[in-house]
Image (spheres, helix red, strand yellow):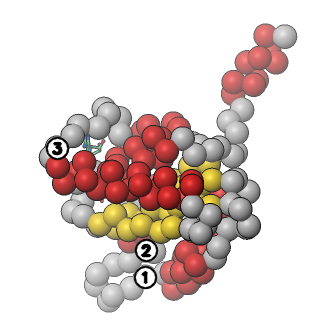
Amino acid sequence: MDDFLNALQEILPAFGASMDDLERCRLNGIVEFGGRHAHIFKRTMLLAEQVKVSRGSPLVTCLLEGPSGSGKTAMASSVGISSDFPYVKIVSAESMIGLSESTKCAQIVKVFEDAYKSPLSIVILDDIQRLLEYVAIGPRFSNLISQTSMVLLKRLPPKVFSSLVLIIDS
Ligand SMILES: Nc1ncnc2c1ncn2[C@@H]1O[C@H](COP(=O)(O)OP(=O)(O)OP(=O)(O)O)[C@@H](O)[C@H]1O
């Protein structure tokens, strides 16, 4: 019986909110630093509320832009945690190191497909420049990932399901 209970704790669910990942993005909690910070958080939470209550907004996308280290990822994770949505996933380049373009695309598509199996979902695309493999010299980026992202960001979830996509850019 003990082995069975231990096994249950070892297995992580593929669906649901990945709370550990989200908590890792704001390790020491959130420190309020000014009205502007509070305003952006409030507006983003309002979008989550809009997705929750409005049947006319099945897909809401929001771009969080700002300097590196300013707390965009921490804020997006806080929204994910506070929203209490059943599915919250963060897509970040750090989980895709060394993967080929097509594998990265497949992973991103999978996150959205899983999101659309949940009545309410939040997908956080962290550091979109890294995900797109953008480099200023060139300029270059992955056209495959870019096209996939653009299609996914326009594809509506199934009927009565709603999703909020937070895109983080620096
Ligand atoms: N308001 C805040 N209160 C407490 N810690 C914070 C706050 N904002 C950011 N941090 C911390 O600062 C660090 C950098 O924040 P974060 O990764 O969210 O920034 P970012 O804007 O997403 O940066 P990048 O664009 O480089 O990914 C993290 O360790 C985060 O926990």
Q: Which residue in the protein does label 2 denote? A: 133
Labels 1 and 2: the sequence-earlier one? 2
Residue sitting at the far right:
1
Quarter of the view holding residue 70: bottom left
The answer to whether 75 appears left or right of 38 in the picture is: right
Q: Residue at x 73, y 67 (%)?
A: 158
Secondary structure of the residue carrying tag 3 is loop
For this rendering, which residue is in front, 67 or 122?
Answer: 122
Name the quarter where the C terminus is drawn. Answer: bottom left
Labels 3 and 2: the sequence-earlier one? 3
Q: Is residue 42 above or below residue 107?
A: above
Quarter of the view holding residue 121: bottom right
Quarter of the view holding residue 54: bottom right
Q: Nearer the viewer, mark 3 or mark 1?
A: 3
Q: Residue at x 32, y 89 (%)?
A: 138
Amino acid residing under circle 2: Glu
Q: Which mark is residue 33?
A: 3
Mark 3 CB lies closer than 8 A to ligand 1: yes
Q: Residue at x 23, y 37 (%)?
A: 31
Q: Nearer the viewer, mark 3 or mark 2?
A: 3
Q: Are marks 3 and 2 in contact (CB under 8 Å)?
A: no
Q: Which mark is residue 141?
A: 1
Q: Position of residue 1 (x, y in %)?
A: 84, 10
Q: Are marks 1 and 2 in contact (CB under 8 Å)?
A: yes
Amino acid residing under circle 3: Phe
Labels 3 and 1: the sequence-earlier one? 3
Q: CA distance from mark 3 to mark 1?
A: 34 Å
The answer to whether 88 appears left or right of 15 in the picture is: left
Secondary structure of the residue carrying tag 2 is loop
Amino acid residing under circle 1: Phe
